[in-house]
Image (spheres, rainbow, N blue to C red):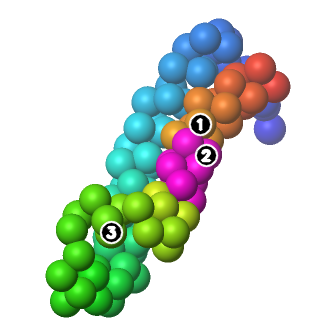
Amino acid sequence: MEIIKLSVSPLSLFASGLNVGKDIMGTMANTLILAYAGASLPLFLLFGQMDLSFTHVLNTELIAEEVVRSLCGSIGLILTIPLTSLMASIKA
């Protein structure tokens, strides 16, 4: 059995990884948004019944904590695809 070696530059391998990563990121983002909205629905209903202003709700500790947690998770999610593609293209 003969092993065929293809010559692919690291730059084109990185670009291909980013291209595939865009599709993966789109599906993961949609899934995470729907999961977060579904899990937070009782909380949204509770705040809706309490007659609080939107700015007051955003400034509560519970909501501020969730916003920071979501931002940190989003940053990690966004950086995952380029870093993985970079490491794979360097290693190859």
> Depth-wise, is mark 3 or mark 2 nearer the camera?
3
The answer to whether residue 45 is visible is no
Residue 9 at x, y percent in the picture: 65, 10
Labels 1 and 3: the sequence-earlier one: 3
- Any magenta on residue 55? no
Q: Which residue is mark 2?
A: 76
Q: Eyeballing the image, is 51 above or below 16?
A: below
The residue closer to the viewer here, 62 or 81, is 62
37 relative to 67, above or below: below
Left or right, 38 with respect to 71, comes to left
10 Å crowding of disc 2: few (<14), some (14-19), many (20+): few
Q: Which residue is depicted at the point 77% across and 20% down?
A: 90
- Please say if the residues under marks 1 and 3 sit with CB atoms less than 8 Å apart: no
The tag on residue 79 is: 1
Residue 74 falls within the magenta-colored stretch: yes
Q: Which residues are magenta?
A: 68-76
Question: Decide: marks 1, 2 in contact (CB < 8 A)?
Answer: yes
Q: Residue at x 18, y 82 (%)?
A: 51
